[in-house]
Image (cartoon, grey):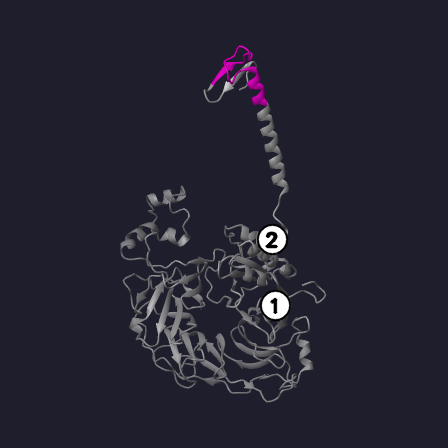
Amino acid sequence: MNIPGYYYDPEKGRYFKIENSKTAPTNAAWSSNNVKRQKLRNKDAATALRHLNLARSRIKRARVLHEPLTGGFFAREYGAMKDDMQAACFVEGLRDKGCIQMKGAGEGGESSQVTQMYIGGQDYKTGMCIIYAALGHEILLSTYIPRDENKRLNQRLLANYRLPAPDERAPYLEAELPQISDIQYHAPSNYMLVSSRRPLPHSRPHTFMGIIMPAIDDVDTDPLCPRWLLPSFSMLHMAPSVLTYGNNETYCVAPAPASSPLLWVLGTRAGIVPWDGPEMPEGVPDPPQSDLLRDVFTVDFHPNMSTVIRFGGRPGVLFTADRRMPSAEWSHLRLPSSITHLRCLDGGNQVLVSGLRNQMGVYDLRFAREHRGIGDDGVKVDANARDGHAHAGNRNDRSRDLQQAGFRGRGRSRGRRGGKHANKSEHEKSNPRDKTVAQPVIRFEHYRNAAHTDIGFAYDPATGVVAAAHDDLPGTVALYSVRTGSRLRVLDFADTSSLPSQSSEARADLDNSTPRKPQPILDVDRVDLPIVQSLKFQTFPGDHTPTLFVAGDRRGGITAFSFGVEDLEDEA
């Protein structure tokens, strides 16, 4: 409070009457001259602060620094390069390069959606890729993927090539199979592998495997004659029975590397089945004795050791199987939810895992608490739980039953007040004592998959980009960096005109670390959009960067996204 004729001393906390400098004590703060000097100092300080605030509002971060490529180069110059600069540059340059339609593309319907596909890029003569695709899990088709000079997909260009079957119109019908679950290619043996979930009812085999031997022409050097001859006129073989009990479903197939004596490994509802030949499996697995070893949705080989296999499924247990040791010595790691996809990263010690309940992350097995054997490790497993979540110990059974009955105690009120568990994840909140469930070293916070096992997933090791479909918004695919777990871009097929201009919105999402709230699925623009079930990275012959293929509509369409420009006249 300013009282006229008085000076307030903030140190002493009292008012002094302003005196003439001739009568006031020496160096008194309330002398008339000192009061005038203090007023001038305060006025100058206020003026400087006002100018500082005005200058701060005028200084903005250069827009070019937000660009992944140019801004990344500048950041590297002063030693602040981001870990996901390479992935961000690649994702920023992806452009929509058109769509190819597979046979059966009618007026919509779920049966016309591409549910599984394999993209091959081995045709160095013509520069085309080949594709094997399953429509509605029932029809297996194949076709070539030609491109124009702007790298846009154009099926009309097939008329310029000398095709093996000129009288037939692509796509070609390969076979009609029940419940196709996976399509893979084993290059050393030239086997196209097609697995099925539904056992054949009219024959003895309980596990179904389709094998196609495509014809490869390396003699003719004509650049207009494809190296991979489609359609495949070879007969589809039925693999014999590999299980001696009940009906068995095959969920996935993993081709073995060239250094392995195996050809492939099947993931079934009763564990894995290694195969060393097209006619006879290596061994017949026994019926599962534990709830841990049930549905296997994904299998991958160690990148450096062909004898080590990692697999997982339902329940959420990540197994590491070494074929040199008996199954009783295999190690396993409990994860927060069921596993839908996994990929072994470079070095083999880290594993990229995606699963249900919005779980995706990178796990470092060197620092994880693993258990030995395929049996129960002392932690109770709910065999009836669909997501296979493991509850920790009998000590939590009583408290869990009370919580389900509505008796939550003091922990509930403390959570609402934002106590010490307020910043923990949803899984840690519900299981604060569960120390047996591993936590990822890198968590993908924006990933959304609540309950779908058949959902698109792809990983490219060269660029470090992870493509994952979301189930909260049908028709969306998010691109992530495997190094940081950050979301770099979202491909939204509800508005295809906005696909190339997603970078500014993606940068805004990266600045906001809070995951977006799930939006309702029944949106007007998304009624005809399915949840993307198949994603693949493949490099065309002659290209230096991979192309992302997305099966993103109900009419059998496959859209390609390649690194480049919209038009040849655009500036790079």
Say if the magenta span includes residue 17.
yes
Horizontal side, residue 117 vs residue 496: left or right: left
Q: Secondary structure at mark 2?
A: helix
Up the image or down, 228 lies above or below 13; here it is below
**Which amino acid is tagged 1?**
Ser
Closest to the observer: 21 or 458? 21
Q: Which residue is located at x 32 percent, y 53 percent?
A: 433
Whether residue 338 appears in this view of the structure is: yes
| Residue 382: quadrant of the picture | bottom left
Which residue appears farthest toward the top when viewing the image?
A: 23
Q: Which residues are magenta?
A: 14-39
Inter-mark Cα distance, 2 to 1? 24 Å
Across and down, in percent, residue 164 comes to 62, 86
Task: Give the residue at mark 1.
Answer: 562
- Residue 455: assigned label: none
Residue type at numbered disc 2: Leu
* Image-quadrant location for residue 301: bottom left
Residue at the location (50% across, 68% down)? 461
Numbered circles on residues, count: 2
Give the image location of residue 338, x and y in percent. Answer: 41, 63
Assess disc 1: are there few (<14), some (14-19) or many (≥20) residues with their C-alpha within 10 Å of its C-alpha. Answer: many
**Is there any visible trace of residue 495 in the rendered image?**
no
Inspect the magenta stretch and tell me whether residue 230 lies in it: no
Residue carrying label 2: 65
